Image (tube, rainbow, N blue to C red):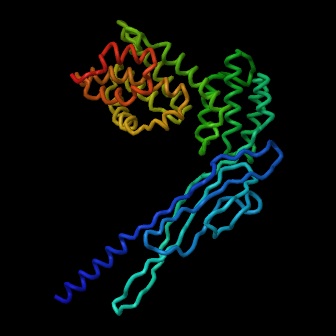
Amino acid sequence: MKLFLLSFLSLILSSSLLAQKPTLQLKESKRVITLDDEKGGNTSVEMRSMFTPAGTKKVSTEWVISGVKGKDWDFAKGDEKSDIIEVNFKRVGNYSVSLNVTYAVKKTLKNGEIEEEEFDISVDNDNFITVTNNLDELTQLHADSNFIKLVKRSGDYTVKEKYANDPTPYIFLAKGLYGVYRKDLKDPMIQDPFEEAITACATAIERDENGVFKMPIHKMWLNGFQLELLNNGVRYILEEEDGYPVVYSNENKDKTAETLAEILDACESYSSITRNPMGIKLIEAAVRYNNRDAKTANLIWKTELPNLMNLTDKDFENWTQADKDALCVGLILSSQALMKRDSSTVNARPMLKKAEKWFEYDKEWIAYYEKKYNSFSEQ
């Protein structure tokens, strides 16, 4: 009986300790900092330690920032032990930030004495802060439509160690190459400007940890570039039925397969130049299903349909217009394929219902959703 009581008491104490679960968050004023072009300068970001003790006692706070203190960055307010810090970043690059809080939990020993046991809780963020550069020279070249020179100068920046992890030179490289393509300019060093622009843009997006592409001037250009690929690589090849898009088909099976392969190539390229590939993936799924690749189509739907149901209005509003257009087309095409696969609207109805408020004024959406299927009543 005594052993049982001791075990029961130990269980209660352990449960009490486990119930005390403090939380830690890192709040920052911004994630992207822009330095003056080639002039250095100090730009700061404020970071706060948000520790919820949940019955424990905070012992200490410690910040760790990558790079070299005094050379790459310095404290403008607080220090490594402060709950609130302000950091001046001096050099281009991506900076990782780690925040660690040590806290104490009281526990009662068998002899009745109170003892404190310390624990750590951490938040580790790789490439948390991006410090980029205006690169005024490249901005001016783009404004002047001097695209061949822009390609060459931005290419020079991409190989500089200072910009090793900065997406900005690659953004301007993509802008230059796309300009060469649009103006049909000729240069022996540029073989396929559109494909090279896709590669440069994809590299920029891969390196854009914290949203350089969210800057209005870059986001506007990206939207235009995406629309070029979406409209000419996908929508132009699709067919139309009663005012809405349908997947291309032809009595000649070889011609159909060849055409659908072209769309799939465009989908793959588009996926590399967006952070929101849901729409283009839904287009791909429908095309693959119609191209007798149901296995791959089903894998895409298995991933993207739950993603769609979890997509918030706020997140959707931050998409480029091209990404929104791709989602509209992807929903129309994928719902057709799913109804064909399921012989019902069981999977088509919820996905279209989810998105109806986003596309209520879109002509193709109205033609398909409201007129053709009468709001997709259950079948």
Compared across the picture, whether 43 is left or right of 127 comes to right
- Relative side of 94 to 271, left or right: right
Give the quarter of the figure containing the C terminus: top left
Q: Residue furthest top?
A: 251
Location of residue 71 with respect to 186 vertically, above or below: below
Q: Position of residue 196 (x, y in %)?
A: 64, 27
Residue name at image x 67 percent, y 29 percent: 174
- Residue drawn at x 60%, y 45% is 210
Residue 108 against residue 69 in the figure, above or below: below
Foreground pick, 107 / 132: 107
The x and y percentages for residue 346 are 25, 28
Name the residue rendered at 48%, 77% in the picture.
Answer: 104
Residue at the limit of the structure toward the right, as seen here = 39
Q: Residue furthest bottom?
A: 111
Name the foreground residue: 64 vs 179.
Answer: 64
Provide residue 169's location: percent of width, then percent of height: 71, 37
Q: Quadrant of residue 193?
A: top right
Residue 7 rendering spot, x and y as whole percentages: 24, 82
